[in-house]
Amino acid sequence: MKKALITGITGQDGAYLAQFLIEKGYAVYGLQARRSTDSLWRLQFLEINDEINLIEGDVTDMSSLIRALKISDADEVYNLAAQSFVGSSWDQPVLTAQVTGVGVTNILEAIRLVNPEAKFYQASTSEMFGYIQKSKQDELTPFYPRSPYGVAKLYGHWITVNYRESFKIHASSGILFNHESPLRGIEFVTRKVTDAVARIKQGKQTELRLGNIDAKRDWGFAGDYVEAMWLMLQQDQPDDYVIATGQTTTVRDMCQIAFNCVGLNYEDYIVIDSKYYRPAEVDILLGDPSKAKKNLEWEAKTSLKELMSMMVEADIKRVAYESKRT
Ligand code: NAP
Ligand code: GDD
């Protein structure tokens, strides 16, 4: 039986990846950071919490990573842990650098010391393209990050490349464009919108305050994207891959799609609030996933309309359930 260790298992992607690997017959181990409140709701939502071996640890504490690698004896290590919210990275730039950036070196060092044969996946991001240097971004497009998060991720990306070249570690970097789901954190714009749609529809909210709704993103479904992570580690050679849909949409049009799901006009509810503008913005992201299609035979399966409809439906159920309880 193959063994996988996932850092960030309590996050959106960690939960879907764990489910995917369990279905493939893997023994799944997950690094769980100590929190004062319950962080297992996503694993419970997917009903896989009892099938995961949780190991307490933190990517800023290399000793805990060494311990996790020894306990799990992992064949594959997926590093998904991060302070992943771009907005917060201006408020906590040092923490973001330590967790999202140096955390990657900690885990690569732990692999080097405990099991250099383990295959490694790094969760890189389209946010590294930032101020885009090419209209459609691929693996060769120069990077220009626009947030402390993007800068930290760029460090994580290059240290992954460096350990691959220096120590022959099977280390791959997935440059994933935005991907969403009903398990997305509420602070990210798609989930903020679908939650608001559900609340407005059920009379619990009257308006939705947003920032720059002219920003454009290439949005896919997280459930599709975790397969690409796994596929990268099944290749003979490690490499970097852009994972995206190849379509870009404004936040405004995404809102329209989400409100349409319940027959409402988004223009009646959205209020622009400068509080949600960022010190520097990534205006547009659009990925070219041709290499992943050719080498991994991977492509996105879920359209933005299907994704929004899935998220709105889940939030409607959630809001109705919460209303019954209160
Ligand atoms: P997420 O929901 O924010 O999950 C982040 C995970 O990291 C959580 O499990 C969190 O634990 C954990 N974590 C945070 N600080 C940690 C620490 N110091 N030590 C150990 N674990 C820690 O993010 P996601 O959307 O699943 O994304 C997964 C990864 O892909 C992240 O690295 C993200 O930056 C990257 N990425 C995401 C996207 C996207 O669109 N979703 C696109 C490109 C790249 P708690 O829940 O306990 O805080
Ligand atoms: N969160 C948020 N809240 N974003 C808003 C809002 C708002 O009220 N109003 C407008 N936006 C705009 C942001 O300014 C940004 O241009 C866009 O919506 C998307 O914001 P997020 O959903 O927060 O995602 P992100 O693109 O900044 O970052 C996500 O994708 C990256 C991949 O490109 C995160 O998942 C990162 O971790 C990931 O690396």
Image (cartoon, rainbow, N blue to C red):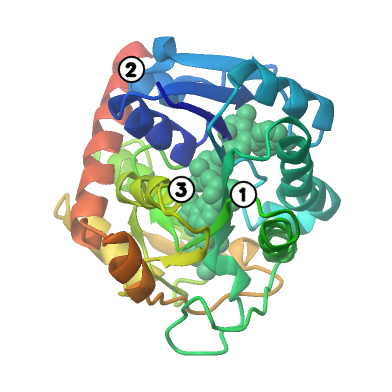
Kindly tell me whether mark 1's CB lies below 8 Å from ligand 1: yes
Kindly tell me whether mark 3's CB lies below 8 Å from ligand 1: no
In the displayed structure image, the side of residue 186 where residue 146 appears, left or right: right
Q: Residue at the bottom extreme?
A: 134
Q: Residue at the left extreme?
A: 263
* Front label number (1 vs 3): 3
Q: Position of residue 258 (x, y in %)?
A: 26, 56
Write down the quadrant of residue 294 in the picture: bottom left
- Three-letter residue code for mark 2: Glu
Q: Residue at label 2?
A: 47
* Front label number (3 vs 2): 3
- Three-letter residue code for mark 3: Leu
- Residue 234, numbered label: none
Q: CA distance from mark 1 to mark 3?
A: 23 Å
Vertical side of 312 occupied by 131: above or below: below
Vertical side of 215 occupied by 263: above or below: above
- Residue 84, numbered label: 1
- Residue 233, numbered label: 3
Q: Position of residue 158 (x, y in %)?
A: 71, 65
